[in-house]
Image (tube, grey):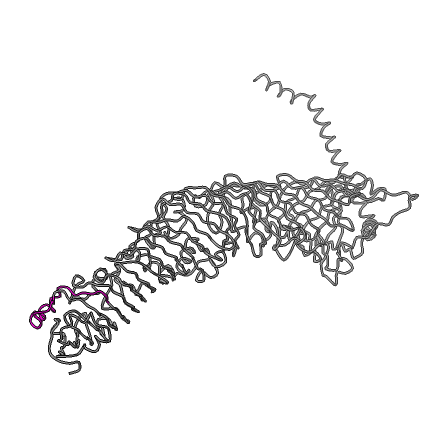
Amino acid sequence: MKETLLQIKTFFQSQRFKRYAKRLGFAFLGLIALLLLASGGLSIYFNQNKKEIIAKINDKINENINGQFHVGDFHYKFLTGFPNFTLALKDVEIRDNQWNIHKHTLLKADEIEARLNIWSLLKQEINIHKILINDADIYIYKAENGYSNVNIFKLKKKKPKSEKEKTETTIENVNLNDVHITIDNQLGHKLFDFEVANLQSKVEYENNNWRTNLYLKTKINSLAFNTVHGSFAKSKDLEGNFDIAYSEEKQKINIETQKLKIGSDSFDIKAFFDIGKNSSLFGINIETRILWRNASNLLSANITAKLNQFDLKKPIKVNCSLLGDLNAQGDPKIVVQALIKNNELSIPDGLFTNCSFGGIFTNNFKPQNGFNDPNSAIILTRFTGEYENIPLTIPQAVINNLEKPIATGLVNADFDAAKLNGMANEKILHFESGHVRANLKFQFDIVDLYINKPRVLGNVDIDKTTFDYIPKNIRAEKTDVKLSFTEQALYIQKIAYKHKKNIIQIDGRIDNFLNLYYDAPEKMVVNWNIYCPNIDVKQFLGVLKRNPAQRTVQKKTTQKNVNFSNQLKAVIEKCTAVINLKADKINYGKLTATNTRATLQMLNSKLLLKNGNLQTSGGSINFSGAIEPNGNHYVFSSMAQVNRVDIASFLKSFNNFGITSFSPKNLRGKLSSNANVTGLMSSKGDLIVNSMRGKLNFKVTQGALLHFEPIEKIGKLAFPLRDVENITFSDLSGDLNLRGEQVDVKNLTISSSVLNFDIEGIYSFGRGTNLALTIPLRNSKNDAQLSQSERDAVRDRGIVLHLLAVDDNGKMKIKWGKKGK
């Protein structure tokens, strides 16, 4: 190593090296001197021929324009661009002849450098090697009448074939620095605005065709194909290389670029632009892999505002195609295609996970309807995903008309019913088991990009499901449910539920379901057919009761996004249910009824009963009425016709209506009655006797009063020879007016085997009893053998007692007296 360094040192110190260095120095100095002399010579040449050069440049420009060309000054740049001759044009401005009308200057530049070929210049020819435009504004304007300020450039005159054509002036290189370019097309309502930081282009010519590789770094202020809707890629930085080719024969410019940076994303783009006199068609095709929000933010504002309501978590593969006419009004044709795999899709109404699908956006859904929002559509194909853990398959769906979007499509689902529990904002239904299969056609409006009023046609089958309807504490066990949605009605089949001891089987129909569900649920009528092998009325009454939490929910302000479960609950609360009831056995406390038939109507929490009939206590009852919750009680109204029921059994079933002076075991006979009564029942369904109001008439046939102690005491003293322990009745009837705690007794007639009674006055379940008793003392044992007229004639013969049954500190007291005395 030391030897090598020593040899190098010796060489630099040798005379031989010194001679070579001296010669090289002289050569370098000579070259500099030659360069200075040449540049000086060019400077001298320019100064001596400045007027002539300026005149030639001015003539060259003016012979090709219809307008005004103004240059503030010319400068020769010493050594710049050597060996070319560099001429700097200061304060350059070009205006067309109609500038005074539209006020848009075609070109205004602080400086334009023109590097001219020296040898061509010496031959009195202009050959521009390079153009550099610095700190400039270029404004290309087209008016609504089709006039453009680029018409400043004259059309070239065709020369005779015999005339020898001169070589056209060409520009080999173009550079732009800090140039603001605006293309304002008022005819087509388009605005392109770019702030070009740097543009470098080297042009290669082949006859009348040319091509270039262009580097561009710019900011996009506007790329608006329709100024009404806004700009694409607004305020985005763009940087990349473009391969550009022009064909004279086709009058077309083709552009291609790869990995073009727009914002933070890369794009592969192919485009063409027709620039012929009769055509301004253009086409742009863009491919990229990009995040949803990044892609939507590159589109025009009217599209971005809609698409930004959605999101995809992972990047997607996208192809975008634009095809249009720069001179035509409105948007170009836009087609965006995307492929999504194993992604998460956010929509205003929720989140789809594990979703895969193909997506297409077009603004020309029906070709004859133009390119606009009403004719725009989003098409989804082969969609699979999970919504709230529910797997869904959508072979195809279309969201059409982005001004008033309507979504249509097919949806299929196959999942365990328990997965439905996660869908509700508020717990309404809770599924324990079962399996769901759905095949539905759907249609819904999209209002502010939220799903609104979904309509479905098709079937939903739920097999062997067990669920609870929580607000009413209703339970269905191991039952099949089939829902059929049609245009005319919703059919409900095969529902059976168990509620405590109640077993109920249901099928039903809701006419005009699709129209009324959202628009007028209060007009919806649900027609149910209900069969009950066994039902306990007191337990069933809990279904009617509305708890405070339900009322609170109803008072909440309706949110924009109404959850389906909340909507369903509101419909259930408002709709009317008409129930055709058939029951083998009904229990109400101690009352047992069989072969019950009735029509029930449920409106909100009110239950109306119509055309009811049942068999009980050896007879039958026809009835109608209503039951409605009121605080901790139930308000009822009833119209009933009782036909020959066993009086003892019947009174026992209703706890003797609260009467304590006798018990059902003291009575025998067949009761017939007509009643129109209102009153209250407790929260457990027990009758509150002193709440009843209304009218009641009754008649007992084949009646008997058995071992009634008050009568026995009196009878043994007053009528020792008569059978007062077993009194039979040929007539027991009366009219009663119920007034809560008190009962007005009118025309209460008792014709018995011991005595005849006529009773009227007031009977009280509490205090205030005041009954007037008229008792003929004659023996009526054989009256039953007489005709009615004969009985009436002899009824009051003999001694007649007038007694009063009055309240005495809560006990019944018998005393002498007449009513009102």
In the image, the segment drawn in magenta is: 700-724
Residue 567, placed above or below residue 32: below
Camera sees residue 301: no
x, y percent for residue 366: 64, 51
**Quadrant location of residue 558?**
bottom left
Horizontal side of 654 relative to 713 (left or right) equals right
Give the x, y percent position of residue 564.
44, 53
Closer to us: 458 or 508: 508
Could you tell me which residue is drawn at 41 percent across and 51 percent down?
507
Relative to residue 672, is residue 362 drawn left or right? right
Q: Is residue 49 magenta?
A: no
- In this view, which residue lies farthest toward the top? 3
Rendered residue at 13%/71% (across/down): 810
Quadrant including the C terminus? bottom left
| The image quarter in which residue 542 lies | bottom left
Q: Where residue 359 appears, x then y in whole percent?
A: 57, 44
